[in-house]
Amino acid sequence: MDSAIARYIFEKMYAIRVFEEKVEVLFAKGVLPGFVHLYTGQEACAAGVCANLGPEDYITSTHRGHGHCIAKGGRLDRMMAELFAKKTGYNHGKGGSMHIAATEIGILGANGITAGGLPIAVGAGLTSMMLKLGRVAVAFVGDGATNQGTFHESVNLAAAFKIPVIFAVENNQYGVGTRFADVSNGIDIVKRAEGYGIPGVMADGMDVVSVYKAAQEAILYARAGNGPTIIEMKTWRYKMHFQGEPATYRSKDEETDWLKKDPIEIAKTRLKALGLLNDTILNEIEANVQKELERAVEFARNSPDPMPEDALTDLFA
Amino acid sequence: MRIISFSQAIAEAQMQEMQRDDKVILIGLVQRDPYGSAFGQTKGVSSKVGTDRILDMPISEQGYVGAALGASITGMRPVVELQFQDFITIAMDQIVQQAANMRYMFGGQIKVPLVLRAPTGGYLSAAAQHSHMLESWFAHIPGLKVVLPANAYDAKGLLISAIREDNFILYFEHKKLYDKKMDVPSEPYTIPIGKAAVKREGKDITIVAWSFMVTKALDASMILEKQGISCEVIDLRTVSPIDEDTILKSVARTNRLLIVQEGYRHSSVATDVSALVAEKGFDYLVAPITLITAKDVPIPFAPVMENFVLPQTQDIIDRVQLILNLK
């Protein structure tokens, strides 16, 4: 890692944090229609992985997708406009929070179906392999997705054909309101890699340096034509499954423990200790991101609504 | 011209498109030679164009249909095959929630140049899990186009059109048609998707059918002709979108409509065609619109029961006579 990458990582992590905090407020005020699933607390996962990707590489994301989109280079203004259901949003108001896509920078969509993006990422990797493009595809999923059949099918396909895909599993411990350990045999997801004959790496999902290193190795391995890796990142979402969900299933002690491992604070400490960033740079990044976020909200607020008849466009090419 | 079978026409269309465009790839079970797919629909293709772009898959329908989708939105033009249409239930999320929604949901950012082929239909004692006609399910979903060729000539032209189209096409091949032979041009040609064909002109009644039911309708029409009854047979070829003009123009001439559908009646293409003519062609009609469909049970194994459940040529003859007050 060099200081440019460290800067990229911290900028994206901080942008995710403040973007989600702003969305939380706007949603609570009733400004944003629909539903939102916030990524707060998991910033190290998206940023640590995406810092290893270029704009031509692909990702697929989940219902909790704002963080992946920002980390992959998504513009805050067009994302915010999409959440505002405006015409200027990435999807022109047709997708919303759970479907933001920006294909020009390889974001093949957030996905409202748990594990729905996995085979699509395998297909994107297949294109790269067949056309010898040297690109990789990262399928971001949560622990919940790993108990869907699609997870098995996708990992098997990628392993069988050595397709350049990284299965980036963010184990935030809960599928909706159920603990992963209560609906699986309590075995680390990463151990499944052995059964597919592919590498599996456990990273600390709250420590961006740990995630970055694990992803770097997996991505270089995939680019070299060796096939997929499963990365498991243990993490914790600060918010509930969706905004408005009653907080009934996680204890205060659990929360206190995880909040001690705040990924933003850990990133500051680690990146400073590595001599890659200092307080002056951190302050400058934070100030710039705050300004960008304010502009994004203004842009979204001032953007036009779609016309009702726009609903009839974009079905077929 | 030379005489080739329906399955050979399908193989030839894929081979010629692969030779024309190196982004065209085949994904499915046992696609490569010597197997060449379950009914020979890819026979000879890998021997001609090589195996690099023909990927034999594990039995993993959701995984490989989704992978074909991912490849299609990133630069390839996959033709993905299910060994039987019945197995489409396993891949429904990738078809209905992902592929059909994707372009629209992303605000038009991507194209989905993807064809999904699958053998469909009954009359083979294949029983309940290998005899489905599910085209009506997919006609229900915006973002999908659904094609069912009824002969080898149409099979080739429609498949070439489907492969060249930048949208997701479901292309269902009736198993009873695979061996049927006819003149098919050896060079590539296209047939427009969404356009029906009048397969037989007549003046007394319009029979709308598609897939294997076109054969039954034509067989019945020949018998009825000897009784002095003139049937017009329309092959829809595409059940979504439906070619409304061709149907309405025909009914305007014949004033009577029979729809023959191998699949189940409720919430189906047949009921849609009926609604179309009731709404837009009511004044043309001198008799009630009538439908022949499968009976509402899973497809049974025993031939006597299967034949009872599925539409037969004699059912068409009887119904036409009834509508024309000859019975």
Image (tube, coloured by chain):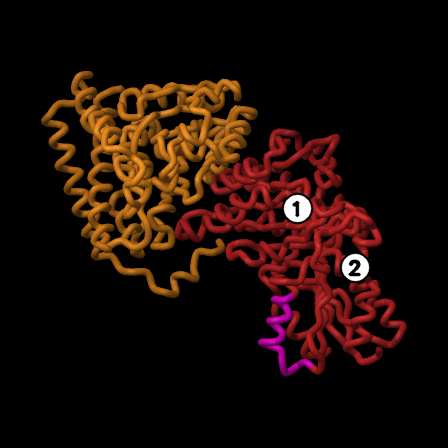
Chain colours: A orange, B red
Apparent side of residue A293 relative to residue A208 in the rendered image (left or right): left
- Labels 2 & 1 near each other (Cβ < 8 A): no
> Is A84 above or below relative to A42?
below
**Looking at the picture, how far across and down is residue B9, in whole percent?**
73, 46
* Residue placed under numbered mark 1 in the picture: B85
For this orientation, the residue located farthest to the right is B226
The part of the image, by quadrant, that contains residue A189 is top left
Apparent side of residue B296 relative to residue B94 in the rendered image (left or right): right
Q: What element carries label 2?
A: helix
Looking at the picture, tell me which residue is in the foreground, A127 or B269: B269
* Amino acid type, callout 1: Gln
**Looking at the picture, how far across and down is residue B220, in whole percent?**
83, 66
Q: Is residue A106 visible?
A: no
Q: What element carries label 1?
A: helix
Magenta stretch contains residue B275 = yes
Looking at the picture, tell me which residue is in the foreground, A227 or A197: A197
Range of magenta residues: B271-285
The part of the image, by quadrant, that contains residue A85 is bottom left
Rendered-image quadrant of the N terminus of chain A:
top left
* Amino acid type, callout 2: Thr
> Is A202 above or below relative to A170?
above
Q: Main secondary structure of the magenta part?
A: helix
Please state the chain letter of the residue tagged with numbered disc 1 in the rendered image: B
**Looking at the picture, how far across and down is residue B121, in whole percent?**
72, 51
* Residue placed under numbered mark 2 in the picture: B215
| Residue at the image point whose x is 64% and y is 70% from the top | B274
Looking at the picture, tell me which residue is in the foreground, A78 or A64: A64
Please state the chain letter of the residue tagged with numbered disc 2 in the rendered image: B
What mark, if any, has residue A243 been given in the picture? none
Q: How many labels does the image show?
A: 2
Label 2 vs 1, first from the N-terminus: 1
